[in-house]
Image: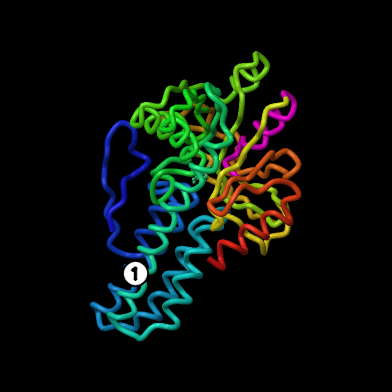
Amino acid sequence: MRLVDQTRLPHETVVAVCATAADVASAIRTLRVRGAPAIGVTAAYGLALAAYRAAEAGADALAAVEAASGLLRAARPTAVNLRWAVDRLLAVARGAPRGAALAERLLAEAEAIAAADVAANQAIGRLGAAMIGHGECILTYCHTGGLATAGYGTAFGILRAAHEAGRGIRVVACETRPVLQGARLTAWELLQHGIPGVLITDNVAGSLMARGEVDRVIVGADRIARNGDVANKIGTYALAVLARAHGIPFVVAAPTSTVDLATPDGAAIPIEERDAHEVTHLAGVRVAPEGIAVRNPAFDVTPHRLITAIVTEAGVAAPPYDRSLAALAGAAVGS
Ligand code: MRU
């Protein structure tokens, strides 16, 4: 399995090769592939890979898939797309004949998830772009583009669709400490697509809002609870509070595979804590003194009351989210 290594962009395009499901789990853990929809799709292909490896070796493919599913599911805890994709593949594996046929079924299911994700992102782009006025300046956070998904992007997909529709938008991309997905990846995709934009350090956002230079905030999501609380990259909550204080719409964009109706609210979403090294070092260079204690939560929760709208491929959810999300997610499952 070949993945564009997101840790090496924008300086070089390096393809990481995963020979086993354990390699795939490691690529997810180390952020070589990241972004909620992208890690779900990647895990799906990882399970197909486990089945092919077992079939080649004459081993029990279903047992190999069951073992790999535990490894992949545990790679990152917050983005529900990972668990969602693994559970979907496991259900297919349990109902499939053993051997090479099982591997083929899993590959077909992974391909179907990838294709559906691209279509969902394009629909999110269309629905979200319809909300945007001419010449808006839109602030975004972290990285939600083609590389964070199976293709096109979620929040970034809206920016892309609005740009392609000639809306004359401008984008403010926050760098997104500690691992700089905004500076490294969003900035790179803005340039790839010719979308006018500027890069800022995260602490500039409030000042731009106070000057009236931001018309809208659009972010992605890693898990959306039943009541509309949204887990996304750490720092999203602060932007939502700032947007509310300045009367700026705060929009979340995500496919329905990110909506977790089984999680009642944000307090029930597990928040990943990552290595201190991400905070004490910048691009491999130590910036903090040895011995300092560090907190490094990778995500935070934005309460539903701060969110203006949630754009999914099945439609735009508005408050009260417990009703609108259940209707949209239910319709997407039934379609
Ligand atoms: O830790 P990361 O880089 O995987 O976090 C990613 C985000 O928080 C994104 O905003 C989210 O996954 C949406 S990606 C379309």
Q: Is residue 254 above or below residue 90?
A: above
Helix, strand or loop at label 1? It is helix
Can you identify the residue that label 1 sits on? 108
Q: Is residue 257 left or right of residue 54?
A: right
Q: Residue furthest bottom?
A: 97
Residue type at the position of mark 1: Ala
Residue 282 visible at all: no
Q: Mainly helix, strand or loop, the magenta region? A: helix
Residue 197 visible at all: yes
- For label 1, the crowd category at 10 Å Cα-Cα, with few meaning under 14, some 14 to 19 and many 20 or more, is some
Which residue lies at the image location 45% right of the left edge and 37% below the top edge?
161
- In the rendered image, residue 239 lying in the magenta stretch gets the answer yes
Q: Is residue 52 left or right of residue 301?
A: left
Q: Which residue occupies the foreground of this view, 257 or 266?
A: 257
Q: Which residue occupies the foreground of this view, 296 or 217?
A: 217
Q: Position of residue 160 (x, y in %)?
A: 43, 35
Which residue lies at the image location 72% right of the left edge and 51% below the top edge?
321
- In the rendered image, residue 146 lying in the magenta stretch gets the answer no
To which quarter of the image does residue 63 belong? bottom left
Q: Position of residue 171 (x, y in %)?
A: 49, 25
Which residue lies at the image location 62% right of the left edge and 59% below the top edge?
260
The type of colouring in the image is rainbow
Q: Which residue occupies the foreground of this view, 235 or 122?
A: 122
Q: Is residue 61 left or right of residue 166?
A: left
Q: Position of residue 276 (x, y in %)?
A: 54, 40
Per the rendered image, the range of residues in magenta is: 232-246
